[in-house]
Amino acid sequence: MQPFFKNLLASNTAHGNNLCVGIDPHCENLPGYFRQEAEDDIHGFLLNFSKAVIDAASGKVAAVKFQSAFFEAHGDQGCLALRAAIHHARCQNLLAILDAKRGDISSTMAAYATMAFRYFNADALTVLPYMGVSVLDPFRTWLENGKGLYVVWISSNKDAAALQNSIAAPLLSSLADWCRLNQNQESIGLVLGATKLSSLNDQLLHKATQFGLLLPGVGAQGAKVDAKLQAVLAQSPSSLYPVSRGLTGFGLEAEGARLGKIAGWPAYSSYVGDRIQRFLP
Amino acid sequence: MQPFFKNLLASNTAHGNNLCVGIDPHCENLPGYFRQEAEDDIHGFLLNFSKAVIDAASGKVAAVKFQSAFFEAHGDQGCLALRAAIHHARCQNLLAILDAKRGDISSTMAAYATMAFRYFNADALTVLPYMGVSVLDPFRTWLENGKGLYVVWISSNKDAAALQNSIAAPLLSSLADWCRLNQNQESIGLVLGATKLSSLNDQLLHKATQFGLLLPGVGAQGAKVDAKLQAVLAQSPSSLYPVSRGLTGFGLEAEGARLGKIAGWPAYSSYVGDRIQRFLP
């Protein structure tokens, strides 16, 4: 079984880009057609939305990223829809990243590993490192079997800096130690907000590019695919920049009128397909 | 609607203790009777286990704490069992804490609030502060309606200290600011590992006791209900020390033989009831 980041690198190269399509089914202020479906059958809505986005992404990019919270908000029906959506993505040769940002002590992380990699069968999971890197130990067998982890290092939101700046260097260094010890460099990546690239010193940024990166913040959060981001992608070609609201329109006020005219999932899938093109090089 | 920690204080006082019964359905190395049920019907197993522990706790303590991961590992069935178990606990006049340690940016935290407080209808949720305290903003309306949050401050596991020590003081201070700004002091608590009390300086510990505390680590993780812990409980009487494996026996090797002789949930509920007595003052 190839390590996760080796697979991802091959697929990024084959598709000629580093875009990751984010699937965040925001359910607030949904335009008419979609609101009706969400009210009538939330499982159907979540799965149809996911499939429409996945079908638009298929053949264009290497990976999709599911924001777990927007499924979890709907309980068991969200859970079933998410599992079916991940299965659909993997059948379309897309790597499926489950963005659930779990973080707890080791015995609990073992249960989250079962959730992500057995029940959902995702290819990679995002985790929070607040409890230290040793809580990654229960994931080792999964990583040896091709699964991947993204450790949230520097998040895309503004207010995180006060806490994260002081621990950024020691966290990166203990994570590098963990990877060496476990010979797992190609299974572990970092989340690094694309909104934070210019505030990082060059030495730390260079160290970070030894990892595959997940670079959120492009689109609704204001970051752009600029020269700085492209330089990072060139240094770490197994990296991805996820775009969610910017592609799906859901949760974006400016897209309300356009989405209001769409009635039906095939038309919506075309809308997303057009938007994906805009974020490609 | 009374704030969460006001309710909790009243219930702790009425019960004359600060024990919180932890519900962590570990499914590894289950003794015979329970293994068979888990294999035949995982939803039934999770719900029957939870009910047996809840019935043993009812009337003795103020609160139960559900470790979300052990339910999530079973997907939609775990999700349904957890919701039914939380409902059962609340019907038995127990406050239900959902220990799910969610942490993400604000727009995502709003969806986790829906998950915890609308779908599961828990009384309180644990959250990770890695993204900064401003991500608590989406919880405000829920807090005004009697729900509570526990922000993980200092966790019970050993290896967390390297990261958490340097940010402990600034995090506590920005959290206190957030509470003042939002007039929410009685809805926000802290997770503080009972294993870490003696390593904290007195000034920081005193500041922490201005909050209701959740003090994990008693039992399987080695902390005891000693003079230090009792002094903290006296200073912050709306605090709780959760015990999970130490009460339920599941996940504890030393209890395997005794649990192997139990066949049936009523007998198991008595076993837990006896163990609860040992952790009471």
Image: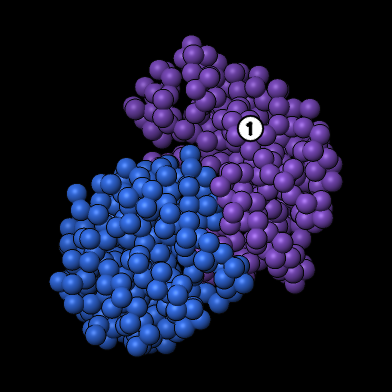
Chain colours: A purple, B blue
Disc 1 is placed on an element classified as loop
Residue B263 placed where, x, y %? Answer: 27, 77
Residue B54 placed where, x, y %? Answer: 24, 67
Q: Is residue A44 visible?
A: no
Residue A57 placed where, x, y %? Answer: 65, 29
In the depicted view, which residue is nearer to us: B29 or B73? B73
Looking at numbered disc 1 in the image, what kind of residue is underneath it?
Gly
Report whether B164 appears left or right of A201. Answer: left
Query: Which residue lies at the image location 31% right of the left edge and 75% below the top edge?
Result: B235
Near mark 1 (Cα within 10 A), the count class, few <14, some 14-19 or many ≥20, is few
Report whether B260 appears left or right of A179. Answer: left
Quadrant hosting residue B216: bottom left
Q: Is residue A198 visible?
A: yes
In the depicted view, which residue is nearer to us: B82 or B220? B220
Quadrant hosting residue B42: bottom left
Report whether A263 appears left or right of B183. Answer: right
Q: How many marks?
A: 1
Residue located beneath label 1 in the image: A222
In the depicted view, which residue is nearer to us: B37 or B153? B153
Q: Residue at the top extreme?
A: A261
Which chain does the residue under circle 1 lie in? A
Residue B150 placed where, x, y %? Answer: 39, 60
**Location of the C terminus of chain B (image quadrant):** bottom left
Query: Which residue lies at the image location 42% right of the left edge and 67% below the top edge?
Result: B191
In the rendered image, the vertical position of residue A268 relative to residue A65, given as above or below: above
In the rendered image, the vertical position of residue A52 relative to residue A267, given as above or below: below
Report whether B26 appears left or right of A230. Answer: left
Query: Which residue lies at the image location 74% right of the left edge and 69% below the top edge?
Result: A177
In the rendered image, the vertical position of residue B29 relative to residue A232, given as above or below: below
Query: Which residue lies at the image location 49% right of the left edge and 14% below the top edge?
Result: A257
